[in-house]
Image (cartoon, rainbow, N blue to C red):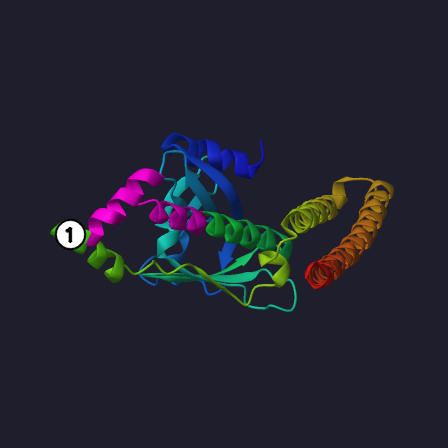
Amino acid sequence: MNVQSAINKDVFIPRDERLLVAVEVQRRRRKRMSFLPAAAQAEYKTFICVSVTNTRPHQLLVTKVKQFEGSSSFTRRSQWTVDQLRQVNGINPNKDSPEFDLVFDNTQDQWVARSSAEKCIFVQILYHACQTYWEGRAGSLGKVGRQVKPGQRALQEVGSRDTPPGPASRTMQARRKSYVPPKQTEFINCQSKLTGDACTMNLLIFRCRAFLNRIKNRMVANQSRSAAGGATRPRVSGGTMGNVVQRMNVALGERGDRLSRAEDKTVDLMHRAQQFADTAHKLALKYSK
């Protein structure tokens, strides 16, 4: 079971929620707690999670989850609704970077993910989840009131011409005029590939890059452990293991470069397809007249 499945099982399924994405993060500016001794500060991992409730109307939630050292369970710390999420700052719109900021009504957090690919996955899924949520909110607000059949609507229109509007109708009109739609979450300094239409291909590329990055980190950790225990192992075995890890690192680097080139080609093809679609639409409008 991977980390995301474990978090979903421990934290969100018991609360009748469904986890969409989770990213492991660290603070860019770690908060100092001077009143605690250094030995009393426990080590832990922090995850920022996006979940949705299973009950209707669906709520989109952002939750901070922690896993303390030596424990296999996860603990929910803070939780906000997407209505409280004012801004998502991608920091750099020109290149992949692991840093991002989340601005809520009452707090602001500056995070750095384990890799730029994991941050891109998180921002992309959060963006499309917010779009779906706000579109659903707009649709539900447009359905206020009961359905009226065409014949009944015509009779109501005829009756409304003869009789002045009553208190109920005036109250409804006043509510409609005074209604202020909620402010949606703002995404700034985010790459266009994270908030564009080619989400499936980009998400696949980001997942591959994140997986390769985890494999690479695991190999580097194994190499460091083998180097630390080299005094009790034959020197030939340590050298052979180092060569294998070095070759794997080179292969992973080359594969990452290929994925980056494929990503750039995908974005270029997307723009060309959009230009072709616009040209075809203009030609169709020209010859249809």
Q: Quadrant of the C terminus?
A: bottom right
Q: In the picture shown, does residue 157 fall above or below 14?
A: below
Q: Residue at x 66, y 66 (%)?
A: 95
Q: Residue at x 64, y 54 (%)?
A: 117
In the picture, measured across the screen, residue 30 lies left or right of residue 266, that is: left
Q: Amino acid at mark 1?
A: Thr
Q: For this rendering, which residue is in front, 111 or 83?
A: 83
Query: Of helix, strand and loop, which mostly describes the magenta segment?
Result: helix
Q: In the picture shown, does residue 33 fall above or below 217?
A: below
Q: Specify start and end residues of the magenta stretch as a single range.
A: 133-161
- x then y, percent, for residue 209: 70, 50
In the picture, measured across the screen, residue 4 lies left or right of residue 185, that is: right
Q: Is residue 10 visible?
A: yes
Residue 30 figure quarter:
bottom left
Q: Is residue 72 visible?
A: no
- x then y, percent, for residue 242: 81, 48
Q: Residue at x 73, y 59 (%)?
A: 280
Q: For this rendering, which residue is in front, 48 or 131?
A: 131
In the picture, measured across the screen, residue 173 lies left or right of residue 195, that is: left
Q: For this rendering, which residue is in front, 184 or 259?
A: 184
Looking at this view, name the residue that lies furthest to the left: 167
Residue named by callout 1: 163
Local secondary structure at mark 1? loop
Examine the structure image and report whether residue 122 is included in the region drawn in magenta: no
Q: Callout 1: 10 Å neighbours few (<14), some, many (20+)?
A: few
Q: For this rendering, which residue is in front, 270 or 277?
A: 277
- x then y, percent, for residue 110: 46, 63
- x then y, percent, for residue 153: 30, 43
